[in-house]
Amino acid sequence: MFFTIRRSDLDQGGVMFQVVDDRFVFALSIHNSALVLQRNEAVSVLTTDKLPSGLERVRVTVLWKHDELYMRCGTAETYREASVPTEPAAPPPSLVRWARQENLLPVIEYSSEEKFRQRVYACLSSIQDKVNEAGAFNPFWDVKYAGQAIESRTPKREMDIHPTD
């Protein structure tokens, strides 16, 4: 999420968004000139008091992944950032139901079991298409060369596969 805000508004405070359930909290707020991003027990606090006082507006970037919360605030030249690791957490079923009731999430129904199976197969085959498109074969194969010719290819064991960037 990206937005710009007046520097003076950071001194005012308030809640930007808040999603709360019995055992789930996800919120972004401003308290005491600091941005506070929380998901369950993980809380990331980004203080803005060290930003130059002459700034009229600042850019705020908020990112969340399954294992991290990240915030950045300032300008392209002068900024502060903060991140905190998190435990992976899925939204509670009540939140998913609410999002569907508000038409924020699509409700997908299949007319038959066969249609559902076809959709799953299509998704699985798209993975192979993406591997082909990226040319990302070598991370999954042990290739043995004789000069420039390939002598043999054998699949790597799962523990031998390493992430590629």
Image (cartoon, helix red, strand yellow):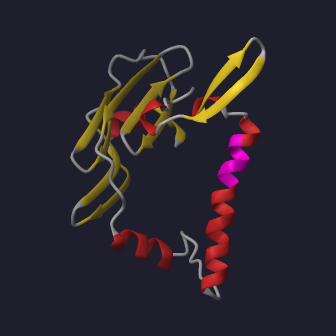
Q: Residue at x 53, y 21 (%)?
A: 75
In the image, 68 versus 126, the foreground residue is 126
Bounds of the magenta segment: 126-131
Judge left or right: residue 74 versus residue 11. right
Q: Is residue 131 above or below residue 18?
A: above
Q: Residue at x 47, y 37 (%)?
A: 157
- Residue 74 inside the magenta-drawn segment: no
Q: Quadrant of residue 107?
A: bottom right
Q: State how many labels appear.
A: 0
Residue 71, percent from left and from top: 41, 32
Instruction: Give the position of the C terminus as an image quadrant.
Output: top right
Residue 34 visible in image: no
Is the stretch drawn in magenta largely helix, strand or loop? helix
Residue reaching furthest top?
Answer: 147
In the image, 40 versus 134, the foreground residue is 134
Residue 11, percent from left and from top: 33, 34
Q: Residue at x 57, y 19 (%)?
A: 76
Residue 121, percent from left and from top: 65, 66
Residue 148, percent from left and from top: 78, 14
In the image, 110 versus 72, the foreground residue is 110
Q: Quadrant of residue 45?
A: top left
